[in-house]
């Protein structure tokens, strides 16, 4: 049976989305396992935060390093390598409980971090080649995969660890075996970098007077609030004796927001939705903090995720069609550089939490969303026309590989 080109592209998009979930799962596993790891190995907040921070830095800054690699190649080799390396995190249960533990934990974190990092810029090049589906929708669907993987990891990991210790993480191994072969029959190819010209063939956002760097700045500020929030909430609620899956709830809201806001952006444009979404996230997060620990607060947290993290794919979509560094480098910066900066800030806050407690950090989490919204308002004043990414991939500086 022959499928239409659009149906084939949907199948490819869904396969890439599943792989995105698999390679983002270690991030969810790590962040909620950290209180257990700290207790198991006798670490304080500072050491635990350092361990998580190094993992996240590798996950993200390696994407900046590798984003421009294989720019003229169209086969998704890094997808397969990444899935295999990701599984290193599952070996935490094998680490000896002695003075060498931190070195083994760091080594496994670095290997797994490389596995998380390698596939991301390449996968975004792959979905950039999909031309029969709206760019806002392809990015939104793809990001839902990452959110879903993060949710599954962050929901299952503490339950498995509570029942079986860190050895419970071995239960995730079949997922990585499946992921290693999933893309092989799909015929997925990557968008290839266009030749450099003095007048890049870009329309929409760049022609309206916006460069890549303010978008990157806005994304980094919002990402910092998200990174600090997803680190501090498990710590704070664990200290309060509250066992509620707050990180999965936040990410659930973000996944729903990715789809619905992506659909709306295809009709209304990205910048306005992102700006008002971040303003809403600021207000809702303040409300959540005031209600922290009450049952109703968890519904508010879902709403924070909807507008706070749900706008992130729209910023990636915007960055695809802006003149600046090469496509792979732009994607590496948007999905790696952003979270790299955010996690440096998380690492810096670990000693603060160790010395002064968690409350001040919790109260400061809305600041990044607010500053990002201010950048968005500034850009909206600069651009009086609606920003909308075009459907035709050839109009956003993408070229097909030569057979």
Image: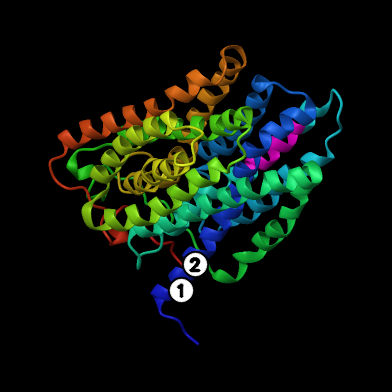
Real-space Cα separation, disc 2 to disc 1, in angstroms: 6 Å
- Residue 215, percent across and down? 32, 36
Rendering quarter of residue 50: top right
User: How busy is the neighbourhood of tag 1: few (under 14 within 10 Å), some, or many (20 plus)?
Assistant: some
Which residue does the image show at 43% across and 47% down from the upper left?
A: 254
Please tell me the numbered disc located at residue 12. 2
Q: Give the residue drawn at x 57%, y 23%.
A: 347
Color encoding of the figure: rainbow
Residue that mark 1 sits on: 8
Q: Secondary structure at mark 1?
A: helix
Residue 156 seen in the current view: yes
Q: Position of residue 72 (x, y in %)?
A: 48, 53
Q: Is residue 389 above or below residue 287?
A: below
Q: Position of residue 88 (x, y in %)?
A: 73, 44
Residue at horizontal 44%, vertical 48%?
253
- What residue range appears in magenta? 105-114
Which residue is at 60% across, 35% downward? 242
Q: Main secondary structure of the magenta part?
A: helix
**Within the magenta stretch, is there residue 110?**
yes
Q: Is residue 333 left or right of residue 159?
A: left
Viewer-proximal residue, 214 or 358?
Answer: 358
Q: Is any atom of residue 70 visible in this view?
A: no
Rendering coords of residue 258 (x, y %)? 39, 52
Q: Tags 2 and 1 in contact by the CB under 8 Å rule?
A: yes
Horizontal side, residue 272 vs residue 71: left or right: left
Which of the 4 quarters of the picture holds residue 33?
top right
Q: Secondary structure at mark 2?
A: helix
Label 2 Cα neighbours within 10 Å, binned few <14 / some 14-19 / many ≥20:
many
Mark number, residue 274: none
Query: 88 above or below 48?
Result: below
Q: Residue furthest left?
A: 384
């Amino acid at each position: 049976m022959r499928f239409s080109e659009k149906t084939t592209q949907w199948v490819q998009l869904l396969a890439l989305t599943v792989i995105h979930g698999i390679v983002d799962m270690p991030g969810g596993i790590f962040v909620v396992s950290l209180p257990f790891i700290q207790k198991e190995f006798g670490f304080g907040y500072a050491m635990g935060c350092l361990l998580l921070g190094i993992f996240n830095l590798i996950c993200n800054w390696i994407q900046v390093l590798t984003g421009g690699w294989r720019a003229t190649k169209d086969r998704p080799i890094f997808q397969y390598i990444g899935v295999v390396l990701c599984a290193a995190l599952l070996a935490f249960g094998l680490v000896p409980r002695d003075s060498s533990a931190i070195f083994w934990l760091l080594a496994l974190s670095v290997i797994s971090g490389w596995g998380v990092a390698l596939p991301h810029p390449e996968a975004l090049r792959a979905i950039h080649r999909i031309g029969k589906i709206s760019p806002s929708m392809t990015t939104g669907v793809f990001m839902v995969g990452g959110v879903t993987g993060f949710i599954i990891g962050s929901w299952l990991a503490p339950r498995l660890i509570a029942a079986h210790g860190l050895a419970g993480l071995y239960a995730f191994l079949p997922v990585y075996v499946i992921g290693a072969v999933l893309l092989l029959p799909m015929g997925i190819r990557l968008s290839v970098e266009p030749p450099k010209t003095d007048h890049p063939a870009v329309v929409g956002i760049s022609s309206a007077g916006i460069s890549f760097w303010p978008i990157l700045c806005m994304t980094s500020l919002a990402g910092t609030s998200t990174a600090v929030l997803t680190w501090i909430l498990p710590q704070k609620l664990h200290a309060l004796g509250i066992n509620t899956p707050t990180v999965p709830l936040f990410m659930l809201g973000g996944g729903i927001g990715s789809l619905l806001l992506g659909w709306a952006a295809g009709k209304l444009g990205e910048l306005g939705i992102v700006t008002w979404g971040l303003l809403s996230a600021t207000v809702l997060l303040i409300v959540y903090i005031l209600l922290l620990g009450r049952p109703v607060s968890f519904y508010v947290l879902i709403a924070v995720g909807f507008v706070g993290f749900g706008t992130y794919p729209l910023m990636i979509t915007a960055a695809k069609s802006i003149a600046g560094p090469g496509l792979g480098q732009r994607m590496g910066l948007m999905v790696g550089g952003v979270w790299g900066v955010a996690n440096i800030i998380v690492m810096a806050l670990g000693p603060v939490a160790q010395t002064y407690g968690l409350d001040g950090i919790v109260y400061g989490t809305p600041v990044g969303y607010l500053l990002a919204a201010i950048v968005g308002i500034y850009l909206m004043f600069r651009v009086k026309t609606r920003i909308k990414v075009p459907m035709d991939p050839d109009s956003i500086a993408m070229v097909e590989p030569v057979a």
